Image (cartoon, rainbow, N blue to C red):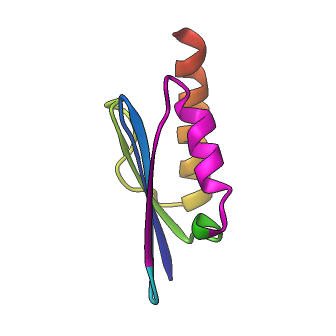
């Protein structure tokens, strides 16, 4: 099993992968581009093939846990994209 945790903060995006054999974490400043940075982090080998996702962030309406990993992560990406266009 692999678990991917995502935190989208006001200044940084944090991603952690917890697997049976290893734990990996990365933090990147997003400089107002959280969607781009999140996509860049999730495209790396360390975070590929996640089975379950947990997402938190500075936008109070981001869900804490995702019952369906891909659908929930896609909804967060969509919401970030909409929020980025407003700012």
Q: Residue at x 64, y 71 (%)?
A: 49
Front one among 2 and 27: 27
Q: How many marks?
A: 0
**Residue 12 is drawn in which quadrant?**
top left
Observer-nearest of 30 and 2: 30
Viewer-proximal residue, 28 or 19? Answer: 28
- Residue 21: image x %, image y %? 46, 89
Residue appearing at x 36%, y 32% in the figure: 61
Report which quarter residue 43 is drawn in: bottom right
Chain part drawn in magenta: 23-45
Which residue occupies the foreground of this view, 27 or 85? 27
Above or below, 60 relative to 54: above
Q: Does the magenta run of residues contain 32? A: yes
**Image vertical order of residue 47 relative to residue 83, above or below:** below
Q: Eyeballing the image, is 31 above or below 9?
A: above
The percent position of residue 47, horizontal first and vertical second, equals 58, 65
Query: Which residue reaches farthest top?
Result: 87
- Left or right: 56 in relation to 20: left
Residue 86 in picture, x, y percent from top left = 55, 10
Q: Residue at x 58, y 39 (%)?
A: 37
Give x and y (percent) for residue 40.
64, 47
- Please name the residue shown 54% across and 50% down the image: 72
């Amino acid at each position: 099993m692999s678990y991917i945790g995502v935190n989208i903060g006001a200044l940084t995006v944090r991603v952690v992968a917890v697997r049976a054999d290893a734990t990996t974490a990365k933090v990147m400043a997003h400089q107002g581009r959280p969607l781009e940075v999140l996509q860049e982090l999730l495209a790396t080998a360390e975070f590929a093939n996640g089975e379950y996702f947990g997402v938190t962030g500075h936008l109070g309406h981001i869900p804490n846990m995702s019952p369906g990993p891909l659908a929930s992560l896609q909804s967060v990406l969509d919401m970030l994209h909409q929020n980025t266009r407003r700012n």
